[in-house]
Image (spheres, rainbow, N blue to C red):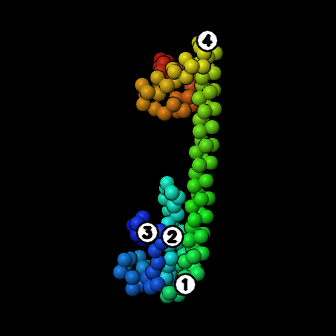
Amino acid sequence: MVDVLAQQDAVSSEDLIGDGRWPRWGRWVHDNLGVQSMLGFQLFTTSKSYGALDMYSDRQGGFDAHDRIIGLALAAHAAVAVASSHELEHLNIAVTNRTIVGQAEGILMERYDLDADRAFAILVRVSQAENRRLNLIAEDLISTRQTPGVKLKR
């Protein structure tokens, strides 16, 4: 069904047992869950697909035209909610990462009497040399208090 939804906004089956698109799955959901028909909608925005909203019925032909309209509306609202949630999550991660990098810059600035640009340049250089994300370099500096790129012998 995921393959079908990747190419269509909605997909339905009035009789899952007789639907040739999913012979094993249709039989399995009928026998194990009592599902006889389904209606699925792609959750998407203009730029991205987020999955699917699927509805199931224990009757053959369990969905009518009104159900399809309601399903499309629900899927549109769900896609916007999921997209907003992802965007908010990404913004929170960005703020957290920026705070961590700022703290690491501050440590380098204090330790070596550097300005902010130079401290940031050092973190970037170490990130590139070690092929590790900048925020991970900064986290290591904050937690270990060891200057990045300098290996201390023990």
Identify which amino acid the numbered label 2 is placed on. Answer: Phe
Q: Where 121 falls versus 90 (above or below)?
A: above
- Return the disc, 3 or 4, that comes first in the chain's sequence: 3
In the shown orientation, is residue 132 left or right of residue 94? left
Q: Residue 78, located in which quarter of the rendered image? A: bottom right
* Label 1 sits on residue: 64
- Return the disc, 3 or 2, that comes first in the chain's sequence: 3
The residue depicted at 49 percent of the width and 25 percent of the height is 124
Label 4 near label 3: C-beta < 8 Å? no
Q: Marks 4/2: CA distance? A: 58 Å
Q: Residue 64, located in which quarter of the rendered image? A: bottom right
Identify which amino acid the numbered label 4 is placed on. Answer: Asp
Identify which amino acid the numbered label 3 is placed on. Answer: Gln
Q: Where 12 falls versus 131 (above or below)?
A: below
Label 2 near label 3: C-beta < 8 Å? no
Label 1 near label 3: C-beta < 8 Å? no
Frontmost of labels 1 and 4 is: 1
Q: Residue furthest front?
A: 46
Q: Name the spot of residue 144 as percent of width and height, x first.
A: 58, 26
Frontmost of labels 4 and 2 is: 2
Q: Which mark is residue 41?
A: 2
In the shown orientation, is residue 66 left or right of residue 11? right
Q: Name the spot of residue 114 as percent of width and height, x first.
A: 59, 14
Q: Residues within 10 Å of mark 2 (few under 14, many from 20)?
A: many
Q: Nearer the viewer, residue 93 or 83?
A: 83
Q: Where 150 falls versus 42 (above or below)?
A: above
Frontmost of labels 3 and 2 is: 3
Q: Which mark is residue 108?
A: none
* Label 4 sits on residue: 113
